Image: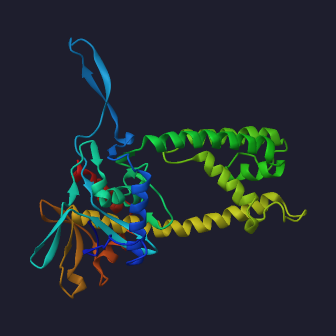
Amino acid sequence: MLLIRNEELVLTGSTTSGTEVEKVIKTKIKELRKTFAGQFPLRFEFDKKLQRMGSLVDSDFRNEVKVPVYPSLKPIPLSAQVVIAGERVVLTYCTSRREKNGKWINLPKNLAFRGKLSIDEHDEDLAFFLLYCLPAVNNAFDCVEIKRVKPNNAFTYSFIDENRVATAIVQKDKAVTEVKYLINNTMTDEQVKGMSIVYNIAGAEMEAHADKLRVSLFTAIELKAKSALSYENVYGEFIAKYKALYEAKSKAVVNDIKKDEPIVEKVKEVVKEAEKEENEIDKEQIELDYKTLISQALAANIIMEFGKGSSDFSKKRWCFKVDGKQSDKICGIFDNDPNESLYKEMLNNEDLVKAIKTKLSEVSK
């Protein structure tokens, strides 16, 4: 079952009934059934980023060989902060619930994961949670209706979908071919110069030889692709940026440009506007990241609110928790919502954010 604010969502019936959040979730679960019909169980494994090389001695005890090694256990958290249908919520998956002292306890709190997990068609709630909501799953699904938190792209688990892997390889090959054709055959000299500025090619503004820039631009894209994460399509990103700058009617950089207006200045103006929009998104993302981090730290028992219930702010503070007892002070509490005080402190204290992440990683080992 899936919960929001400790209330079970109603996921039966038509996809047009229920709250907006329930409608979205029911629609996505229906799409999962259709997409993976006949392909269950769905498989999850440790992400390749967790792999390290270990040594193994052969049966003769003479030769030592290097083998990939993964952690023995990484519990899967079963709560995640997401934005669904424009509403920011903490979504929780559980299999059962019980009441204790007037409070609901959801079970299990996390899912033991030792490197392999299979989900059959009867547990579609969990499949939805992992593929659409949990930020630690690589090769998961994205959609406009659901925005998951992605703290530092820190993938721990990976969804194993051979069909999507094959499709991604084909799409990437097509994108590489399209990028080559764009740069060498479609783009004008001015467009090459503009895109070279976007990709920070040294001396692009002053370079008079367009073909030299074409070579430098494609090389820069290749280098970026080599260092990219597995879910990033660098070539597709280039195509999207080119279309946004030179084909979108709302951003007429070339077709409507005045002859006496330098292309370089126009490109810079568009890029600056795009960066401004990106910064606004980043602010919202940071808030999601940090508030999710607070929830995870509370669930892991590594921080505590001292003076809880007191109306005197001078007696209230956030502290780290060691062996169930109060430890180092983190910050004071000056808001009616204690979490808000901690969030504000995190915004101005990168060391605190790192400390919480470190303690969380130690707990999960």
Please state the horizontal and vertical placement of residue 193, each as a whole percent of the image: 78, 50
Please state the horizontal and vertical placement of residue 165, each as a whole percent of the image: 48, 41
The quadrant holding residue 317 is bottom left
Is residue 314 something that shows in the picture?
yes
Instruction: Determine whether 347 is above or below 165 in the image.
Output: below
User: What residue is shown at x 74% (from left), y 37% (from top)?
Assistant: 215
Instruction: Determine whether 29 is above or below 203 in the image.
Output: below
Number of callouts: 0
Front-most of residues 168 and 135: 168
Instruction: Determine whether 165 is above or below 305 in the image.
Output: above
Front-most of residues 341 and 235: 235
The quadrant holding residue 275 is bottom right
Front-most of residues 94 and 303: 94
> Given the current orientation, which residue lies at the most extreme right position?
259
* In this picture, residue 199 sits left or right of residue 331: right
Is residue 88 something that shows in the picture?
no
Front-most of residues 91 and 254: 91
* In this picture, residue 112 sits left or right of residue 234: left
User: What residue is shown at x 35% (from left), y 72% (from top)?
Assistant: 13
> Given the current orientation, which residue lies at the most extreme left position?
101
> Given the current orientation, which residue lies at the most extreme bottom position?
311
Please state the horizontal and vertical placement of residue 315, each as a whole percent of the image: 20, 81
User: What residue is shown at x 71% (from left), y 40% (from top)?
Assistant: 180
Which corner quadrant holds the N terminus?
Answer: bottom left
* In this picture, residue 10 sits left or right of residue 171: left
